[in-house]
Amino acid sequence: MATLLEMAAEIVSSHASTTPMSSDDLLQEIQKVYASLRAIEAGQPVAGEEVKPAITIKEAFKKNEVICMICGKGGMKTLARHLKTVHNMKPGQYKKQFGIPSKQPLTAKSFTEARRQMAMDRGLADNLAKAREVRMAKLKEKKSAPAKPAKPAKPKAAKKPAPVKPVKAAKPKVAKKAK
Ligand SMILES: [Zn+2]
């Protein structure tokens, strides 16, 4: 531990050589630096200082949880909300800071896979729906195909009553003739 204290004294004295410090300041700083050095040696995060992530990206994205690489909070399915509420950070910033590929979703692997599966299912459902639509459209075409010649027949049918009327009108004539 003496080496740590020596290191602390060295760090603080080099600091003191550039910044005017009182002896109280020096003592306080030596204690602070010493505590920090000891914490670093013990592998503990140093309070009040930005710490490099203790976990790798691989460790951060587990099968059933995603771990925040800033504060080490785990047990989350997705990080975006935690980043926003706790660290006031956008997913893009977080990815940049920790060198996470921009395409990688900030979610637990199982969650990502489930979502991908859902998307695939949805895609499949969409394709099925489209295929059905196409089939229905083809059926309609087939049905409407024979119906098309029938349509021009309607005006003919409308014309038909016209010649029928004279026949009807002729009936009374016939009736008169009969009388
Ligand atoms: Zn966090």
Image (cartoon, rainbow, N blue to C red):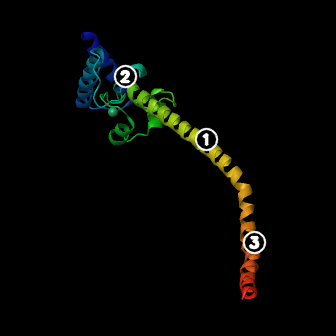
Q: Amino acid at mark 3?
A: Lys
Ligand 1 in which quarter: top left
Q: Is residue 3 above or below residue 160?
A: above
Find residue 32 and report its horizontal and vertical position in percent. 26, 26
Q: Is residue 125 above or below residue 101?
A: below
Callout 2 touching callout 1 (CB < 8 Å): no
User: How busy is the neighbourhood of tag 3: few (under 14 within 10 Å), some, or many (20 plus)?
Assistant: few
Please name the residue shown 32% across and 31% down the image. 76
Please name the residue shown 30% across and 18% down the image. 40
Q: Dividing the image into 4 quarters, which one contains the C terminus?
A: bottom right
Label 1: which secondary element? helix
Residue receiving disc 3: 159
Residue receiving disc 1: 135
Q: Amino acid at mark 2?
A: Lys
Find residue 116 and report its horizontal and vertical position in percent. 46, 30
Asked where in the image residue 175 lies, by quadrant, the reply is bottom right
The response on whether ligand 1 sits within 8 Å of label 2 is no
